[in-house]
Amino acid sequence: MQFEQVKQQEQEVLMPTYNRYPVAIESGAGAVAIDTEGKAYIDFGSGIGVNSLGYCDPEWVRAVAEQAATLQHISNLYYSPVTVRLGQKLCEASGFSKAFFANSGAEANEGAIKLARKYSSDKYGEGRGGIVTLVQSFHGRTITTLTATGQEKHHQHFAPFTGGFSYAKANDMESVKAAADSTVCAILIEMIQGEGGVLPLEKEFVTQLAEFCKEKDILLLIDEVQTGIARTGSFFCYEQFGVSPDVVTCAKGLGGGLPIGAVLCTERLSGVLGAGHHGTTFGGNPVCAAGALAVLDRVTQPGFLEEVLKKGEYLKNKLAQIPQIGGVRGMGMMLGASLQKGEAAAVAKACVKNGLLILTAHDVLRLLPPLTISYEEMEKGMEILQMTLEEELK
Ligand SMILES: *Cc1c(COP(=O)(O)O)cnc(C)c1O
């Protein structure tokens, strides 16, 4: 099917909720996507940090296909061995005690928020269910996670929003202390604000925030939906900040392309959500779990994280050498590049035309390539980016 036909048919049947690039992707291998007209694209986005092992990684495909042919779903009324294996692997890789499986990042964050509120109401009673999040954060699209998202543009159209949320400025402890009064049970943060513009938090701020939380018995919830699962060169990004959160959420890269999210908590919190307190029909789905296991098997291999850091450095250096790029920020293979002039959105659109899929976040170009991208693919992508910037920003 040709592109124009796909586009026209979509307009007839799908709600127009997405601004799409004028391309329909049909297949892929490694870090290369192929569209309906057979044109190839180097992929610097992996979906949005989802295809962590690239397109159709052979081991991931085998794990998913075998599980689909064995048992595709079993209700949470019953036990599922592959889901248990994923829980073991995730706890072992992260050092957390217990996991709850959700189906997306927003749902994982909903679970973390519920866990925090229940912990507090069990221990302190009612009236301490407040959650503080950071300005410019992004936590999801459900009504509650939209409320948690600290961006005014997301607090439109859908009122009434969930009560109990307040916002503090990133890297500003005074602002956090002002927001985190005696009605607050948790603070929810991203280590690098992804959708907000690839903005890493300052280490000093994170250390102080963690100490403050401990003092007040406020739970520290870290949203690693975008930064997690080896993306920044450590299994979770917070490890590089030297703090110990109470709860961590992950999703995007976890399933290698399948919808799965997780809430992880420490031993102390492992009994907070009991039978009937939380659940979801699809959570821990065996096929998604098999895909996630293939991802975890890969990213926990010796040397994998070092390779992510090395590739991240390579990309950072290449970006820094491009004259039209003003600055580069981020960690590991999660990078944002600001432009000397022009609009990131227009550059990303021109990149697509030239055969490169690249993301934006606010005013920066955002790179979240598959963790398995080859140096050859990175070099080719960088050549396209450089050529596009020369063309677009003459
Ligand atoms: C993408 C994202 C989410 C939402 O994940 P969905 O799977 O789209 O619900 C939440 N938090 C962060 C940090 C994200 O990047």
Image: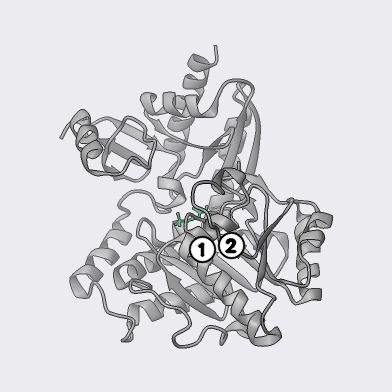
Of residues 183 and 360, the one nearer the viewer is 183
Side (left or right) of 56 relative to 368: left
Task: Judge by depth and name the residue closer to the eye, 371 or 346.
Answer: 346
Residue 303 in view, yes or no: no
182 in relation to 62, above or below: below
Q: Label 1, on which residue?
A: 250
Mark 2 touches mark 1? (CB < 8 Å): yes
* Rendered position, 283 above or below 339: below
Count of residue discs: 2
Task: Please rate how many residues cluster around mark 2, counting C-alpha atoms within 10 Å: few if below 14, some from 14 to 19, many from 20.
Answer: many
Measured from the top left, where is residue 70 in percent x and y? 20, 74
Q: Which numbered mark, 2 or 1, is in the foreground of this view?
A: 1
The x, y position of residue 151, in whole percent, is 61, 47
The residue lying at 49 percent from left, 66 percent from top is 108
Q: Mark 2 sits on what residue?
A: 236
**Left-right relation of 248 to 287:** right
Which quadrant is home to the C terminus?
top right
